[in-house]
Image (spheres, rainbow, N blue to C red):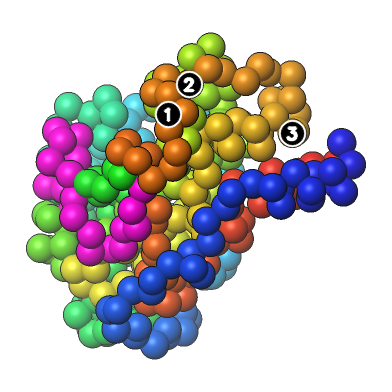
Amino acid sequence: MSRVFFSEFMSGLCLLSLSSLTPSTRARPAVASATSSAPPLLIVGAGVLGKLIAEEWRGLHGPDVAIRGVVRRADADRDAALRASGITPCLRSDLFRADAGLGEGSFGHVVFCAAPGGNDDYSAEVAAALRMWGGGGEGGGEGGREGGGGRFIFTSSAGVFAEQDGGVVTEGSAVSDTPRAARLLACEAAVTAAGGAVVRLAGLYLLERGAHNAYLGMETVKGRADGLINQVHYADAASAVVAALQRAQAGDTLVAADDAPLTREQICTVARLVSPFDARPMPAFEGGEAARGGAGTGKVIDCSYTREAVGWAPRYRTFADFIERLAP
């Protein structure tokens, strides 16, 4: 496929630019410079996102910065790969073992990015991670956005927002009362009460994983073709978390999303422009073809406050931008 054709196709997509949205009226704090020290980092959930966060942290502080990654179970091959990437793996059962160097308050910087799925006591895991945190310390979360102190970052989901009728949401918008949302919100509350900060992430993707990969593996997708899906690339999510580690204030609730959502149908259409998705058929969508703006069309995330507060912007403006860079 020629790049000219691709560009013409992309120009035909109905992309909603956040520059056209009403901006947040919240104050915009000045962005501070990054910390120049090399503080150790504890990552609870050393999966795809956790490894990318570690890579970002090493990029800031050098290859010798100490990074511990908490995993659910031992796996020799996975653990060797983590060590090769500069992460020392440890099991959940190692937490609070003095001989493992993981006593209470051992880390000034902690990220909790373990997924809630398959975790029977998620809130207890978050509470345990909070006990590993030594608090903000001098110049930390309570001291504004300067980079000298430690921070605890909990990665939540933008799925907690209540809006489902196509409206715009910002960091302070109303949240849902579904059981899944309530579980995450309880953890968010525990983190912010302890002086940590929350980063709610839009739908994560890489070429080989994400909404497009799921939809194009189905004959029928549950959900409307015109339903809006907010997304952010895994690498951009990692850079947002690291920006929060440097500059978030105690109690912050931040949101990381790219510039504009795409509809489910657009996501599939765009993904089918590149291999390996070009050979996959377009799925059918449940929920009809009602015009965008009706009930059940999802939400549009405006995270302009977060971007200015912690000095972050996504490398990939949209999923379509990501695919365009891959197109031959």
Relative side of 25 to 61, left or right = left
Relative side of 171 to 87, left or right = left
- The magenta span reads 166-188
* Badge 1 vs badge 2, beta-carbon distance below 8 Å: yes
**Residue 171 covered by magenta stretch:** yes
Rendering coords of residue 75 (x, y %): 44, 25
Quadrant hosting residue 69: top left
Rendering coords of residue 253 (x, y %): 25, 63
Rendering coords of residue 112 (x, y %): 30, 50
Quadrant hosting residue 286: top left
User: Hey, what amino acid is under mark 3?
Assistant: Leu
- Residue 273: assigned label: 3
Tell me the SS state at disc 3.
loop
Query: Residue at image x 39%, y 56%?
Result: 301
Of labels 3 and 1, the one closer to you: 1
Compared to 115, does 197 lie above or below? below
- Residue 285: assigned label: 2
**Residue 97 covered by magenta stretch:** no
Q: CA distance from mark 3 to mark 1?
A: 21 Å
Query: Residue at image x 57%, y 52%?
Result: 15
Compared to 87, does 313 lie above or below? below
Residue under label 1: 224
Of the pair 220 and 206, the residue shown nearer to us: 220
Q: Earlier in the sequence, mark 3 or mark 2?
A: 3
User: Hey, what amino acid is under mark 2?
Assistant: Phe
Tell me the SS state at disc 1.
loop
Rendering coords of residue 182 (x, y %): 13, 41
